[in-house]
Image (tube, rainbow, N blue to C red):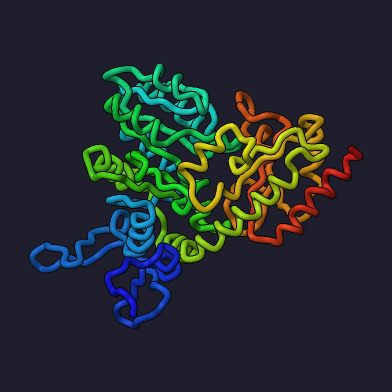
Amino acid sequence: MTDENKPLNRETLMAQGLGWMESVHKSLAPGIYPATTYEREGDGSYPTGRIYSRPDNPNYEQPEQLLKTLEGGSDALLFSSGMSAGVAVVQALKPGDHMIIPAVMYWGLRDWILSFGKTWGIEVSSVPNGDLAALEQAVKPGKTKLLWMETPANPTWEIDDIAAWAAVAKNAGARLAVDNTVATPLLTNPLKLGADIVMHSATKYLNGHSDVLAGALITAEEDDFWDRIITNRRTNGTVMGPFEAWLLLRGMRTLHLRVERACSSAMAIARHFDGAKGIRAVLYPGLDSHPGHDIAAKQMSGGFSGMLSLCIEGGEEAAMAVAARLKVFKRATSLGGIESLVEHRASIEGEGTPCPKDLLRLSIGIESVDDLVADIEQALAGRNI
C-alpha cells in the first residue's frame, strides 16, 4: 500500500514537471503561449490576472515553480540570461550601499559588478575565496548590504562555507546571494544553509543542451528587496521568450540524470589524472586533497559537480597545445551541457584574471567516460612529455 500523503521525490517532480497537465487537451508536453497581451473584461478587470507578457507569460510559471520547489524558496523568477539575473540583484542595491564579492567567481559578472559599482555609487570589496576572516574584516557596519558568493568558484573551484557566509551576512544586517549554477539544486541548496537569494545561469545545467540563454533567481522571502528585483525585471525587460522558457523546462526534466552522470564522470577523470605525468594540478573539490573538500562534502550531496580544471605542466603554451589536440572535447565557452567542453580560461578572461595561465577548464558531459579519459591522454601524449 502506498502513502498518498508522502511527498514525491525530486527526481519524479523533475521528470514530470511537477505533474502539471495542460488543462484543455491533456497533453503531456505543455503548450507554448506566444501572446504578448491579454484582454480585459468590460469593467477593466483581468480575469486571468495577466496584463502583458513581459511579467505574466504562462510559460514562465511551470519552470519557476519547479525551481522554487527544488531550492526550497518562496518565489522564483526567470530571466533572459544568467548575467541579467545577477545584474538584477546588484541593481536592487541603492547608491551608497556596500557589497562584498569573492576574488574568484564568474569573470563576466565580477567585471560588470566592479565597473557598475563605480557608476552606481556602490562600494565593492573583494575577498580571497575560502578566507572567512577576510570576509568578516571586509564588512562595513551599517553599509554592507549584500554578500555575493559562488561555490564551487569558476574556474578554479574553491569552496566557501555557505552557512558561515550566511552568519556573517546576518550579523551585518546584509543579504547573502549565492550563485548555485555549478552545484545545481541537486547538489546544494543554499537557502537551507541560510542564504537569502539563489542565482542560476540556467543556460548551463538547468537547460543542459546548449540551446537556450536563461537565468533564474529564487528567494527565501518575498520582501522589499525582492520586490525591487521584480520591478527591475519588468521595467528592464530582461525576460525570456515563451519558446525559450518551454525549452528550459524540457531540459530540467532530465536534470537529475545529466548531473548524476556528469558528477560521476568528473570524479573518475579527476582521480585518473591526479598526479599524472604532464599534469601540474587537478582542481576538483571531490578529491580528498582539495583544500575545500571537507566543506564541500558538508554542503554538497550526491556529487561534487561536473566541472574540473587541469593545470598543465609547461605553462600557457603547453595548455593551449593540449586543448588543440583534444578531439572528443569541444573547444567552446559555457558549461553544463550534454557535450564535454574545454576552455583556456585565462585567455578568455583577459587582463586582470586570477586564473592560472596553465589552466584548462573542463565541463564534463554525458559521453562515455572512457572516451573522455582516452582523449585527454592522447592530447597529453602528443606533447611528447
Residue 165 appears in view: yes
Q: Is residue 271 left or right of residue 324?
A: left
Q: How many marks?
A: 0
Is the residue 139 above or below the residue 199 in the image?
above
Q: Quadrant of residue 314?
A: top right
Q: Quadrant of residue 320?
A: top right
Residue 333 horizontal/vertical position (percent): 63, 46
Is the residue 241 above or below the residue 237 in the image?
below
Residue 266 horizontal/vertical position (percent): 65, 50
Quadrant location, the N terminus: bottom left
Q: Is residue 170 left or right of residue 209?
A: left
Nearer to us in this view, 2 or 344: 2
Q: Residue at x 60, y 43 (%)?
A: 286
Is the residue 272 above or below the residue 155 in the image?
below
Q: Residue at x 30, y 41 (%)?
A: 229
Q: Residue at x 46, y 60 (%)?
A: 248
Residue 174 horizontal/vertical position (percent): 30, 29
In the displayed orientation, state which residue is furthest to the bottom.
Answer: 25
Residue 106 appears in view: no
Q: Quadrant of residue 349?
A: top right
Nearer to us in this view, 220 or 347: 220
Q: Residue at x 48, y 22 (%)?
A: 127
Is the residue 9 above or below the residue 151 in the image?
below
Nearer to us in this view, 376 or 46: 376
In the displayed orientation, state which residue is furthest to the right.
Answer: 384
Quadrant location, the C terminus: top right
In the displayed orientation, state which residue is furthest to the left.
Answer: 43
Residue 21 horizontal/vertical position (percent): 34, 75
